[in-house]
Image (cartoon, helix red, strand yellow):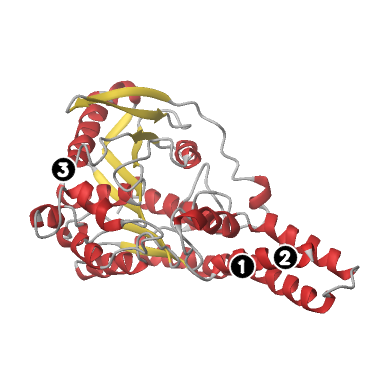
């Protein structure tokens, strides 16, 4: 009976590959199962073998374990399917080819073996600097130097956390990855809501740009070659900065599952078991859409796209229960309408934070797409 209960629990958990998680407490399951699939596949296989040599509930258990195994394997199968066209999609969107990639990079969109061997990035120590003191808050950034010597493009990374939590340690492996690929990487902290509502985050990012330019000689930064990457709230912050901040040298933006239309988000809130998203927005923007409509518009990147907006790579999971995938679809459509180079990497099984494991199915697809996108905007001639 214990065997059957374990099988049933694993089957239920496996369904996160096809359906959004129902609550905040199950969110981590929605990240772990699709992005570490081989672990759970081995568990399923072990239960299958155990069942094979058992008599009680044998038939139904064999069927259940077999079905569960194939559901658990589905992100791997779908990653290969997406990977079959990803190189062509990126070439059509940004003009970048696999043959353009040199030095450290991921050669394939997805490799089964990489889930076990890793991506080969060497650990590069970072240094922490205070870049500003805004509103009485000391703000720092972690700077990871490029593995390639000389003056290099600079990647600025902005963390998520609903504008009210989190810090620049988020998915540190990605920062290290891009330092291996030849970028000077600055990951910033910023002031958090509700104590510091909008536009504090934009002010802090401006301060980070100013500090990086001031120290560009020491840090070997090409100040004509900035790119930005952000997740969730961080994605919203960098999109707003990229489209309204008028910072020179911003060549491209990689935004993961960010909210891009604040009035729409308020009218279409999250499942309350996931998050009180309306309270999150009130904390960040200082009130409701009726009370501070100008802030809701100012922090909605969708409304600020122009033909001069920088090229933008979007990445979003269909199963994201924190920020609906339809928002990235709307952003992609608006960018295309303005003839801005763009591509939306859609992860069918992905939840919020799907790229947490860089060597998982979604993590590999993400790094492959982002590194080629950055290459196209920073190191390729028109």
The x, y position of residue 85, in whole percent, is 50, 69
The x, y position of residue 348, in whole percent, is 48, 68
Reply above or below: 29 against 204: below
**Residue 34 located left or right of residue 7:** left
Residue in the picture at 50% in, 40% down: 173
Residue 222 - label: none
Categorize mark 2 by other alpha carbons within 10 Å: few (<14), some (14-19), many (20+). few
- The answer to whether any part of residue 368 appears in the image is no
The x, y position of residue 76, in whole percent, is 62, 64
Q: Assign the N terminus to one quadrant of the image.
A: bottom right
- Considering only order in the chain, which callout, 2 or 1, is on the residue closer to the N terminus? 2
Residue named by callout 2 = 5
Q: Assign the C terminus to one quadrant of the image.
A: bottom left
**Residue 82 located left or right of residue 4:** left
Reply above or below: 123 against 367: above
The x, y position of residue 82, in whole percent, is 52, 68
- Considering only order in the chain, which callout, 3 or 1, is on the residue closer to the N terminus? 1
Query: Which mark is nearer the camera, 1 or 2?
Result: 2
Query: Which mark is nearer the camera, 1 or 3?
Result: 1
Numbered disc 1: secondary structure: helix
Distance (Cα) linking label 2 and label 3: 51 Å
- Considering only order in the chain, which callout, 3 or 2, is on the residue closer to the N terminus? 2
Residue in the picture at 61% in, 69% down: 74
Residue named by callout 1 = 12
Numbered disc 3: secondary structure: loop
Distance (Cα) linking label 1 and label 2: 11 Å
Distance (Cα) linking label 1 and label 3: 42 Å
Residue named by callout 3 = 199
């Amino acid at each position: 009976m214990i065997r059957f209960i374990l099988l049933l629990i694993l089957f239920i958990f496996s369904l996160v590959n096809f359906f959004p998680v129902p609550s905040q407490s199950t969110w981590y399951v929605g990240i772990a199962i699709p992005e570490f699939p081989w672990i759970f596949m081995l568990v399923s296989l072990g239960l299958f073998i155990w069942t094979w040599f058992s008599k009680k509930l044998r038939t139904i258990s064999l069927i259940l374990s077999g079905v569960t195994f194939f559901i658990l394997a589905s992100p791997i199968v779908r990653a290969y399917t997406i990977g079959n066209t990803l190189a062509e999609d990126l070439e059509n969107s940004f003009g970048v080819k696999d043959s353009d990639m040199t030095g450290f990079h991921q050669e394939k969109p997805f490799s089964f073996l990489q889930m076990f061997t890793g991506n080969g990035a060497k650990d590069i120590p970072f240094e922490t600097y205070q870049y500003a003191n805004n509103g009485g808050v000391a703000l720092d950034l972690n700077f990871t130097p490029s593995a390639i010597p000389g003056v290099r493009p600079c990647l600025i990374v902005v963390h998520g956390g609903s504008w009210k939590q989190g810090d620049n340690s988020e998915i540190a492996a990605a920062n290290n990855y891009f330092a291996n690929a030849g970028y000077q990487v600055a990951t910033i902290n910023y002031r958090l809501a509700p104590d510091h509502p909008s536009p504090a985050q934009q002010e802090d990012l401006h301060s980070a740009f100013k500090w990086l330019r001031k120290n560009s000689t020491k840090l070997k930064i090409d100040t004509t070659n900035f790119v930005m990457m952000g997740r969730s709230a961080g994605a919203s912050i960098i999109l707003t900065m990229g489209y309204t901040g008028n910072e020179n040298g911003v060549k491209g933006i990689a935004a993961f599952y960010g909210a891009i239309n604040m009035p729409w988000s308020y009218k279409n809130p999250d499942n309350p078991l996931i998050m009180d998203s309306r309270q999150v927005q009130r904390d960040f923007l200082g009130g409701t859409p009726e009370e501070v409509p100008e802030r809701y518009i100012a922090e909605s990147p969708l409304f600020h796209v122009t033909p001069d907006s920088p090229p933008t790579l979007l990445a979003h999971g269909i199963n994201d229960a924190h920020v609906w995938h339809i928002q990235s679809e709307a952003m992609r459509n608006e960018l295309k309408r303005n003839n801005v180079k763009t591509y939306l990497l859609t992860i069918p099984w992905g939840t919020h934070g799907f790229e947490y494991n860089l060597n998982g199915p979604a993590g590999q697809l993400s790094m492959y797409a982002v590194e080629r996108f950055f290459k196209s905007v920073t190191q390729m001639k028109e």
